[in-house]
Image (cartoon, grey):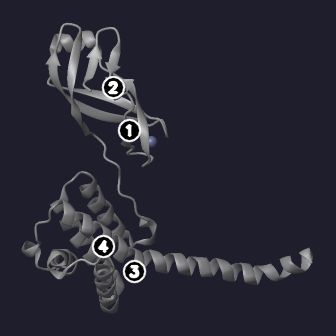
Amino acid sequence: MAITIERDKGISRGAEEQFGLECPYCGIYSHMSPQAVPDFENLAHIRPKHIGIVYQCDACNAPVFLRFAVRQFNDDSIDLYQNFIELERPKERFQFSYLPKQTELLFREALSCYSTNNFNAFASMCRRAAASSFTSLGESGKLRAFDEVMAAQDIAEIDDESFDPIKKVIFDSGEGDELPLLNRAQAGILLEVMKDMFYQCFVRRGKLSRAIKVRRFFVQDGSSGVKSSA
Ligand SMILES: [Zn+2]
């Protein structure tokens, strides 16, 4: 099962030859093939504690960088620990173009914190992104956003105690030090609730009004088209 870099042969993964990962570029769980493996002679000479290997995503051909810790140097091989660090994690996606400019900027940074496992930086940026969105939505819009978040809690069947920190992060702005500390699980809930709230308040509205505009355009423009094809 060990991962080994062998003199003159390159990398091998023992019995577990197939190796898959969620690609940070295309987001597909894909087979990864080694693309660039460090030179054995050089590694044997400098004996680093960690080494980097570039894999290639078989779905989109993008390079994926992984870092492994070295377990042992042997005469003709180097054994690596199986666990690795992904230097680029898959990005969380959202239809940012529907958000107000400032909210978009702040929420992009929030998702980038989440992708790098910085969950409390993520929570802080969620509060800023939410506050910025409430400025655009106005007081009635903020009340509607609150209703959407309550509806999300109800749909997901999350109890009040678990949901309280999520609500505090989103709605208790102006009391900076009161931001609760979140763990991975709570950050995951916050992520989904924020996406849903922004979807309901901005994306849905933007998509619907754009689609209706397009329909109206074709109705106005279409009368001559219908005649000519009839
Ligand atoms: Zn890919």
Between label 3 and label 4, give the one nearer the viewer.
Answer: 4
Q: Within 10 Å of the Cα at label 1, are there few (<14), some (14-19), or many (20+) other Cα atoms?
A: some
**Residue 196 image offset from top left, x and y in percent:** 36, 74
Q: Residue 6, relative to residue 52: is it above or below? A: above
Task: First in sequence, mark 2 or 3: give its number.
Answer: 2
**Residue 15 image offset from top left, x and y in percent:** 33, 25
Q: CA distance from mark 4 to mark 2?
A: 42 Å
Quadrant location of the N terminus in the rendered image: top left
Tell me, for residue 193, which label it has, or none.
4
Q: Is residue 33 left or right of residue 3?
A: right
Task: First in sequence, mark 4 or 1: give its number.
Answer: 1
In the picture of the structure, the residue carrying the numbered disc 1 is 20
Circle 4: element type: helix
Tell me, for residue 6, which label it has, or none.
none
Is mark 4 in CB contact (under 8 Å) with mark 2? no
Circle 1: element type: strand
**Residue 134 image offset from top left, x and y in percent:** 30, 82
Task: First in sequence, mark 4 or 2: give its number.
Answer: 2
